[in-house]
Amino acid sequence: MRKSIAVLVALALLASAVFAQAPGGSAEKKFNLKLAGIKTPEDPASKAMEKFAELVAKNAGANITVKTFNNSVLGSINDMLSGMPNGITDLFYNTLSCYSWLGGAKVFNAVSAPFIWDNYSQLQAFLDSEVGQVWFEEAAAKTGVRVLAAVGELPPRQLTSNKPVRSAADFVGLKVRTAESALVQQTMRKLGATPVVVPFADLYLALRQGTVDAQENNFITARTASLFEVQKYLMKTDYIRDVSAIFISENVWKQMSPAQRAIVKDAAVQACKFEAEQIAAQINATMEFLKKNMTYVEVDVKSIQDKLGANIYQEFDKAGQLWPTGTVDKIFQFKANFKQ
């Protein structure tokens, strides 16, 4: 009799364990997640947010729903990233470069350093490399914010201004709006410009009122945020390369089952790639539109590179303020062995 009872108890425990791990089973926690972003509803980034929510919703048994909040309605980039561990939002859609604003993710400043990558393929290969993956895991543990996906080619960072910028000399005294990126601020100072931190939601007004003279975003953003209405000139600098990224609160991630994690991660990758596809389809028409509404100025990019100097990475690395000393060496070691 005792043996029969023991067998029944063992079977019950086994069934319970299997049920708890079953994808979509009722033992999985139910999540109602907030996904925040800063771009306007028309921007490909906001469309990608909707795509993410749609893809997750297709997995009805996952017990996950996603509600999107674009156009900075939940706050600025810094508000979102720093507030994620406290629940201000569960997910955040933006670019990978902003991850470095968190103290425990400063290594990603080096990934976004000006002119450090020869092309997008090189950048993406590094992010997918063993070193890149280790950096992602370490940053998640330190910051409480995990990168779900970092993929999808974005147009390089460009410049618009109310003054023509033809060479590095024209940066001197220029008031350039930047986000709260220490890297971009340091870069602008090195060029002789005056960086002025303005949240993206306030950028249009700051340009219209003359609080700043210029700003550095890609040309898609210049159109979707209507910056062409308050800027006269556009210059192609290609000085920072970036990828789309979706971030998730580490607290939320740890509560998810393996099946739920797989669903949101796959949806994140697809959403980021969707944004890249939307941008690729729009970029030529966007350039034509901007050139009709603004004056396109050819800029001497080499003069900018020369002004920053070939040793800029070593200078930043040695100072140890933008990223831990020795970080940039790992990037150059990767580049030395990279094959297209």
Image (cartoon, grey):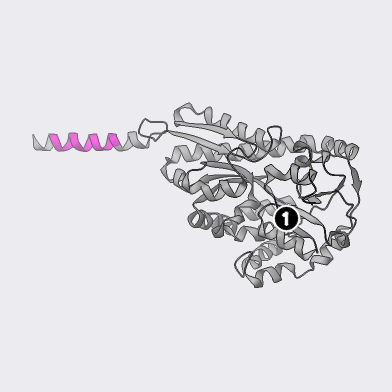
- Is 155 rendered above or below residue 18? below
Residue name at image x 89 percent, y 40 percent? 291
Quadrant in which residue 329 is drawn:
bottom right
Taking the image as shown, residue 114 lies to the left or right of residue 229, namely left
| The N terminus lies in quadrant | top left
Q: Which residue is mark 1?
A: 196
Question: Residue 234: x percent and y percent?
Answer: 86, 47
Question: What secondary structure is the magenta-colored segment mainly?
Answer: helix
The amino acid type, in three-letter code, at marker 1 is Val
Q: Quadrant of the C terminus?
A: bottom right
Q: Which residues are magenta?
A: 5-16
Please name whichever residue, 178 or 91, is drawn nearer the observer in this view of the structure.
178
Could you tell me residue 285's position as x and y percent?
A: 84, 35
Q: Secondary structure at mark 1?
A: strand
Q: Quadrant of residue 136?
A: bottom right
Residue occupying the far bottom of the picture: 318
Q: Toward which corner of the image does residue 63 lie, by quadrant? A: top left
